[in-house]
């Protein structure tokens, strides 16, 4: 059943809980952060972790992805992360 939901979610922000690594890679790539998605498979980063771990936030994300603080799109990333996390929590 969860696989069916994941297949249908196709990056719908309402289905963040079911996002896989692939969904997150696509989302980050769409935000211009494709340089930082290598190794995401081994990171344990997925939608359920992002939604259910109450300590997960913008800082957690940039640390997990090893994104330097001087990357120009960080504001855009932070805004988009808040936009997808808020309704899911």
Image: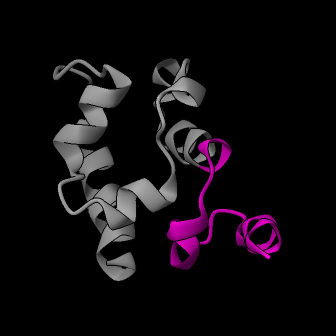
Residue at coordinates 73% horizontally, 71% vertically from top-left? 2
Q: Which residues are magenta?
A: 1-23
Which coloring applies here? one colour
For residue 84, above or below residue 23: below
| Residue 2 sits inside the magenta stretch | yes
Q: Residue at x 35, y 66 (%)?
A: 52
Image coordinates for residue 64, horizontal then vertical, percent: 33, 29
Placement of the C terminus among the 4 image quadrants:
bottom left
Residue 24 screen position, x and y as percent: 55, 46
Question: In the visual, does 76 lie left or right of 58?
Answer: right
Quadrant of residue 15 in the image? bottom right
- Residue 72 visible in the snapshot: no
* Location of residue 13 with respect to 55 vertically, above or below: below
Residue found at the far front of this picture:
1
Q: Quadrant of residue 5?
A: bottom right
Query: Magenta: predominant secondary structure element?
Result: helix
Residue, x 56% and y 36% (percent of image)? Answer: 29
Q: Position of residue 27 (x, y in %)?
A: 55, 48
Does residue 13 belong to the magenta stretch? yes
Q: Nearer the viewer, residue 3 or 77?
A: 3
In front: 79, or 10? Answer: 10
Q: Quadrant of the N terminus?
A: bottom right
Q: Is residue 66 left or right of residue 37?
A: left
């Amino acid at each position: 059943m969860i696989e069916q939901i994941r297949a249908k979610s196709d990056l719908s922000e309402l289905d963040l809980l079911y996002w896989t690594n692939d969904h997150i890679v696509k989302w980050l790539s769409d935000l211009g952060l494709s340089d930082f998605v290598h190794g995401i498979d081994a990171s344990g980063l997925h939608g359920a972790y992002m939604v259910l771990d109450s300590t997960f936030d913008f800082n957690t994300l940039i640390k997990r992805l090893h994104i330097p603080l001087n990357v120009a799109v960080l504001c855009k990333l932070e805004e988009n992360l808040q936009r997808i996390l808020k309704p899911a929590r």
